[in-house]
Each structure stands twice: as structure tokens, then as C-alpha cells.
Amino acid sequence: MSSQTILPEGWRRPRGYSNAVVARGRQVYVAGQVGWNAQEEIVCADFAGQAAQALRNVVEVLAAADAGPQHIVRMTWYVVDKQEYLASLQAVGDVYRKIIGRYFPAMTAVEVTALIEDGARVEIECTAVVPDQEATG
């Protein structure tokens, strides 16, 4: 991947994300993905399970755009319950590394009062940048 993570001098390295990423290339904007399958059915009520499915959906959308998890430079998580999210961090970290790998984009998590899809506990959107030498379109 032809991108660079940014860590200001004197700052602690964040766990599980980067403060900033610099990249150049073809940009792919992935709309918010929730924990549902291709038939738009929520796969489970469990936060970590929904996060895993949403991440699998992100990877599938990226693949359709000839990109992969290694190209993600920005990710936003919308969660309906901050405490549920925090209580699930270990499990979410495990599924994140299994599905996305050890790529840590600039990331934001926001607690919201609700998501549009009934039963959704988390929605994940991202931006990926495929370096110019890899870009095919």
C-alpha cells in the first residue's frame, strides 16, 4: 500500500486506528454498511456479530471496486449504544483483525440515537484509496 500514517511528534500511538493517513490514487467511497446479508436481513442481535457482518460487507463492496482492506484510509463507525460498543471492544478487535487485517485507517466512532435500518446496532462507512500504480480504471 502506498500510504503513510501520520503521528504528530510526542503523541502516543493510538490503538486500533491512525490519527491521519496520506494517500494518492483512485478513491472508493463505501456507503454505510450494517450487519445484514445480501438479502438485507440483519444476521444477529449481537454487536460484535453485526460489526463482523458490516466489515465483511465493506470488504465485498471494496472487492467489487477492485480494492481491498489494505486500501482503506478512513473509516467511521456509527453505534447506537456507546456502552455496548465499549463492552464489545475485545470481540470487535478480534473480528476486525480477522476480516480487515492489521490496517489501521484514520477512524471515528460516533454514538447516534438510532440507525435507519431496524435492528441495526452499528453502521460502518469508509474511504479507500487504490494507489495510482494499482489503479485499473
Image (tube, rainbow, N blue to C red):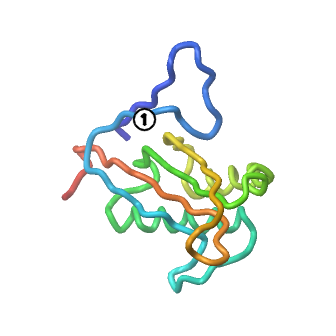
101 relative to 8, above or below: below
**Residue 48 as seen in the image, left or right of residue 9:** right
Residue 67 horizontal side relative to residue 12, left or right: left
Residue pictured at 47% horizontal, 62% vertical: 59
At a point 40% along the width and 51% down the height, the residue shown is 127
The residue drawn where x is 65% and y is 53% is 111
Circle 1 Cα neighbour tier, 10 Å, few/some/many (<14 / 14–19 / ≥20): some
Q: Residue 126 lies in what quarter of the image?
A: bottom left
Reply above or below: 53 against 132: below
- Residue 6, position in %: x, y? 46, 27
Total marks in image: 1
Determine whether 35 is above or below 2 in the image.
below
Q: Quadrant of residue 49?
A: bottom right
Q: Which residue lies furthest to the left in this view?
A: 137
Residue 61 horizontal/vertical position (percent) = 41, 67
The percent position of residue 74, horizontal first and vertical second, equals 45, 46
User: Residue placed at 56% from the left, 44% from the top?
Assistant: 102
Query: In the orientation shown, which residue stands out farthest toward the top?
Result: 10
Return the residue found at the far bottom.
39
Callout 1: SS: strand
Quarter occupied by the N terminus: top left
Q: Indicate left or right for 105 with 84 as reference.
A: left
Q: Position of residue 72 (x, y in %)?
A: 43, 49
Q: In which quarter of the image is the C terminus?
A: bottom left
The amino acid type found where label 1 is placed reads Val
Q: Is residue 8 left or right of residue 96?
A: left
Q: Mark 1 points at which residue?
A: 21
Q: Which of 105 and 64 is in front in this view?
A: 105
